[in-house]
Image (spheres, rainbow, N blue to C red):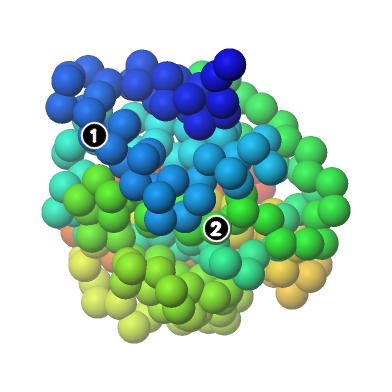
């Protein structure tokens, strides 16, 4: 009987265009399991499998090959943490279809909001940088405690200092919506994050994904 981990490995292997990428996917998943107990957490929280698929899919779509992220300095804004709480519903757009995951007990801790994107990037040989308000102290990647609701929160990063950026799920997090119940305030934060993303990218840099941009587009 296949486990969720086996299913994830099989699904993500379909993204591989080369034997090198196929091997990279298997190795990356095995390492995540050894370091962070991924298979057990997927069994406990079924939505985690879709979230890992989403994040790996974004890398593949952005670069066309997982090998291409090696050495890239990539900023993950609101990267998640080991103390993050979950909203009641998460919308997950994966390369294999869109899914809406209902999250019972949303006030509690969830493995779904651990910093998986930065962990994945690190195992793929990239140079990830994560920013979040939650606990990242035990993480191996470069990270900073940042209150993204404050103006100028990312000003400490130099201009054009990243090859890629992403922000994901900040605006639906319980912590953020409690801090900013007003849509106008959330739009203000989204506008600043989008401006910062443009400032921080180098001349050939790319936006892997931006919830800030999507929120601003919905405003129009």
In the image, what residue occupies the spot 53% across and 40% down?
Answer: 39
Which numbered disc covers residue 209? none
Examine the image and state in which quarter residue 220 appears.
top right
In the image, what residue occupies the spot 51% across and 46% down?
Answer: 38
In the rendered structure, the answer to whether residue 131 lies left or right of residue 4 reads left
Marks 1 and 2: CB-CB under 8 Å? no
In the rendered structure, the answer to whether residue 92 lies left or right of residue 21 reads right
Q: Name the one closer to the observer, 55 or 214.
A: 55
Q: Name the one closer to the observer, 134 or 202.
A: 134
Determine if residue 20 is in view. Answer: yes
Residue linked to disc 1: 24
Q: Name the one closer to the observer, 81 or 77.
A: 81
In the image, what residue occupies the spot 50% across and 31% down?
Answer: 5
Q: SS for tag 1?
A: helix
Determine if residue 180 is in view. Answer: no
Q: Position of residue 8 (x, y in %)?
A: 48, 27
Examine the image and state in which quarter residue 182 appears.
bottom right
In the image, what residue occupies the spot 30% across and 77% down?
Answer: 157
Q: Which circle's residue, 1 or 2, is located before the other in the chain?
A: 1
Mark 1 crowd level (few <14, some 14–19, many ≥20, 10 Å Cα) = some
Answer above or below: position of 204 versus 1.
below
Q: Name the one closer to the observer, 174 or 203.
A: 174
Answer above or below: position of 206 versus 138.
above
Tally the marks: 2
Examine the image and state in which quarter residue 22 appears.
top left
Q: SS for tag 2?
A: loop
Mark 2 crowd level (few <14, some 14–19, many ≥20, 10 Å Cα) = many
Which numbered disc covers residue 114? 2
Q: Position of residue 218 (x, y in %)?
A: 64, 42
Q: Position of residue 101 (x, y in %)?
A: 72, 36
């Amino acid at each position: 009987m296949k486990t969720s981990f086996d299913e994830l490995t099989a699904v993500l292997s379909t993204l591989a265009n080369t034997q090198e990428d196929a091997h990279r996917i298997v190795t990356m998943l095995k390492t995540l399991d050894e370091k962070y107990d991924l298979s057990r957490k997927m069994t406990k929280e079924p939505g985690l499998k879709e979230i890992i698929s989403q994040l790996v899919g974004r890398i593949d779509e952005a670069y066309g090959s997982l090998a291409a992220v090696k050495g890239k300095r990539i900023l993950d804004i609101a990267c998640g943490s080991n103390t993050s709480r979950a909203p009641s519903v998460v919308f997950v757009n994966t390369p294999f279809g869109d899914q809406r995951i209902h999250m019972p007990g949303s006030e509690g801790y969830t493995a779904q909001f651990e910093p998986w994107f930065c962990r994945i990037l690190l195992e793929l040989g990239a140079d990830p940088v994560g920013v979040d308000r939650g606990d990242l102290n035990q993480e191996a990647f470069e990270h900073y405690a940042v209150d993204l609701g404050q103006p100028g929160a990312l000003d400490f990063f130099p201009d054009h200092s990243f090859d890629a950026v992403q922000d994901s799920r900040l605006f639906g997090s319980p912590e953020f919506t409690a801090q900013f119940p007003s849509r106008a305030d959330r739009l203000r934060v989204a506008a600043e994050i989008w401006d910062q993303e443009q400032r921080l990218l180098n001349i050939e840099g790319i936006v892997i994904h931006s919830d800030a941009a999507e929120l601003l587009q919905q405003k129009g």
